[in-house]
Amino acid sequence: MDFALNDEQLAIRGTVRRFVAAELLPREAGFLRHGLPRDELRELQDKARAFGFWGLATPEEYGGMDLPAITRSIVHTELATTCVPFRFGGTADNILFHANAEQRAEYLVPTIEGERLGCFALTEPGAGSDASAIATTARRAGDDWLINGQKTFITNGNDADYAIVFAVTDRDTRGITAFLVDRTAGWTSTPIATMGSWHEPATLFLDEVRVPATAVLGEVDKGFELAMRWVGAGRHAIAAQCVGIATRCLRMAVDYAGLRRTFGRAIGSNQAIQWMIADSETELEAGRWLALRAAWDADRGADARHSTAMAKLYCTGMVGRVVDRALQIHGGMGYTKDLPLEWWYRAVRAMRIFEGTDEVQRLIISRDLLRGHTRIGGHVA
């Protein structure tokens, strides 16, 4: 069994590392104090495009790189070694590729080019983990639809000019339909203050918002299947990001343990510090392979839900423990805003909640085993 990266993967990893070192790490101090303005993000994305990085998962017909999942996982890991929330441009929600030709021209292509910004509006105050329990409705009004409801914790909801809104269109069968809804149609948003500042989610309000029949994305009553494709696709990326964050935090902890001296010697000579470092390295290595296994399953066309659930469950817990130990090793300095540790300490906590809570991942894993869909050890039955 060969775990080595191929030449192309090594080259891409090296290029991303150089980009992070040259363009992102120097911006960390400013980001921790003032955030990252959108115009600066766009400038960075333009520089990345000049490097050849544009649309990592976007098909080549739309100008993207269409990278395999493992290669994207490597990229996500490297980008996550900085707290600057940079993402390569040229991407769009994967379910937009199920749009018809007219919708692709109006929403997909402008989103890929950065001319439009959308948000994925599924979660509601009473429907988080149980997304099928959404209460937002859409009823026919002649040739149009009238949408009523509330969405919450919507990423990009404050800045988006359109939303992919999921609404119940058949109460009897719980049919759910996806709609492409421009902000100009009448929906509004308010920001949600959260513990971390990685994402600024929003609550969306839709009150008799009228959209034409052409706003339906995919088929009427078949939107929930589309939603689950979007959610599942992001989970192994989250695991890879956790690996990147933990890698940087552990590097910082090891460096500081060698430099910081107390009672006449480096704190790294203390067994308590050594054990924190050893535990972090062991957990990080396990998380790295779980993340890559999930991406490998996706690349080979296997059912990746089981391995992805394990990767997200383990890695999101692992990164919290590694960040906590790194902060503890740094002592009071780790608690200041001069270092990214306190920021990560708050930010990573959300990873155990969004795109499937820990409890949902455990449900998926145990259900697969108890129903015989997966053999113990991760081999698909």
Image (cartoon, rainbow, N blue to C red):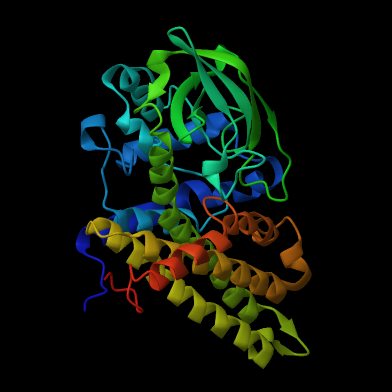
Q: Quadrant of residue 204?
A: top right
Q: How many marks?
A: 0
As drawn, the residue found furthest toward the top would be 142
Query: Where is residue 159 shown, x and y percent of the image?
Result: 58, 27
Query: Where is residue 116 shown, x and y percent of the image?
Result: 45, 23
Query: Where is residue 51 shown, x and y percent of the image?
Result: 32, 42
Would residue 6 be found to the left or right of residue 213 on screen?
left
Query: Where is residue 29 shown, x and y percent of the image?
Result: 65, 50
* Residue sitting at x 63%, y 45%: 31
Q: Quadrant of residue 192?
A: top right
Residue nearest the observer in this picture, 364 or 248: 364
* Residue sitting at x 46%, y 37%: 44
* Residue sitting at x 70%, y 33%: 191
Can residue 193 be seen at all in this image of the molecule? yes
Compared with residue 118, is residue 317 higher up or lower down, i.e. above or below? below
Residue nearest the observer in this picture, 94 or 278: 94
Compared with residue 22, is residue 152 higher up or lower down, i.e. above or below? above
Compared with residue 253, is residue 166 higher up or lower down, i.e. above or below? above
Q: Give the quadrant of the N terminus.
A: bottom left
Residue nearest the observer in this picture, 6 or 317: 317
* Residue sitting at x 38%, y 66%: 307
Would residue 108 be found to the left or right of residue 280 on screen?
left
Can residue 85 be seen at all in this image of the molecule? no
Would residue 225 be found to the left or right of residue 243 on screen?
left
As drawn, the residue found furthest toward the front would be 172
Q: In which quarter of the image is residue 39?
A: top right
Q: Give the quadrant of the C terminus.
A: bottom left
